[in-house]
Image (tube, rainbow, N blue to C red):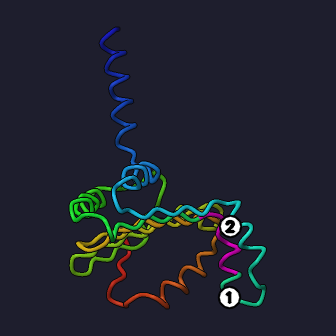
Amino acid sequence: MKRVLILFVFALSVLGTSAQSVEALFRQYRNEKNVEYVHIPRFVMSMVKMLAKEGQDEAGALKAVSSVRALDMESCSPAVRKNFQKTLQTFQPAGYTPVVFCKEGDETSYIYIKEKKGYIRELLILSAGNNEGAIMQIKGKIKPDDVDTVVKRNTKKNCLKKL
């Protein structure tokens, strides 16, 4: 009985470590030297929404976003960027659906989403290359059609591949 209990606890611990989280990824890299980390919480976003002018396209996009987190590794050491590249090769965030994969030269980009009731609740963008690395997490209630419009307007045609 003791063996079964030990094996059960071990199996649960292994399952817990296989699920990768975005929080852990931010925590792992935000304290590295020369990494720029910005978090705009829900409260600050609500203040920005009040100041946005109604007639602009950006005002509509702002209303859909509740918080933003960004991490930029452009100024950090090549060793940190290389480690980030290796991390992204095996990174599969729990609860997210992979949408876009783009590999161009040495740069690789991933876009993941979390959906609920027909809206995108979280958008996760990961990008890594020899000279840069970035993580962007956008939370809110975003219409998928709005994302499609922005993606089509700002990407190269041969770069998009559905995962």
| Quadrant assignment, res 11 | top left
Please say if 5 is above or below 27.
above
> SS of the residue at dot 1?
helix
**Looking at this view, is 76 or 155 the one in front?**
76
Q: Residue furthest top?
A: 1
> SS of the residue at dot 2?
helix
Instruction: Please state if 125 lies on the left or on the right of 46 as rendered.
Output: left
Please say if 17 is above or below 11.
below
The residue type indicated by label 1 comes to: Asp
> Which residue is denoted by mark 2 in the rendering?
45
In the image, what residue occupies the spot 53% across and 82% down?
148
**Looking at this view, is 139 or 33 the one in front?**
33
Estimate how packed mark 2 is, as few (under 14), some (14 to 19) or many (20 or more) residues with alpha carbons within 10 Å.
Answer: some
> Which residue is denoted by mark 1 in the rendering?
57
Q: Magenta span covers which residues?
A: 60-67
Please say if 82 is above or below 106.
above
By secondary structure, the bulk of the magenta-drawn segment is best described as helix
**Magenta span has 30?**
no
**Magenta span has 63?**
yes
Q: Position of residue 102 (x, y in %)?
A: 32, 77
Q: Position of residue 14 (x, y in %)?
A: 33, 34
Q: Residue furthest front?
A: 34
In the image, what residue occupies the spot 35% across and 70% down?
127
Q: Earlier in the sequence, mark 2 or mark 1?
A: 2
* Quadrant occupied by the C terminus: bottom left
Numbered label attached to residue 65: none
Q: Position of residue 129 (x, y in %)?
A: 27, 72
| Quadrant assignment, res 91 | bottom left
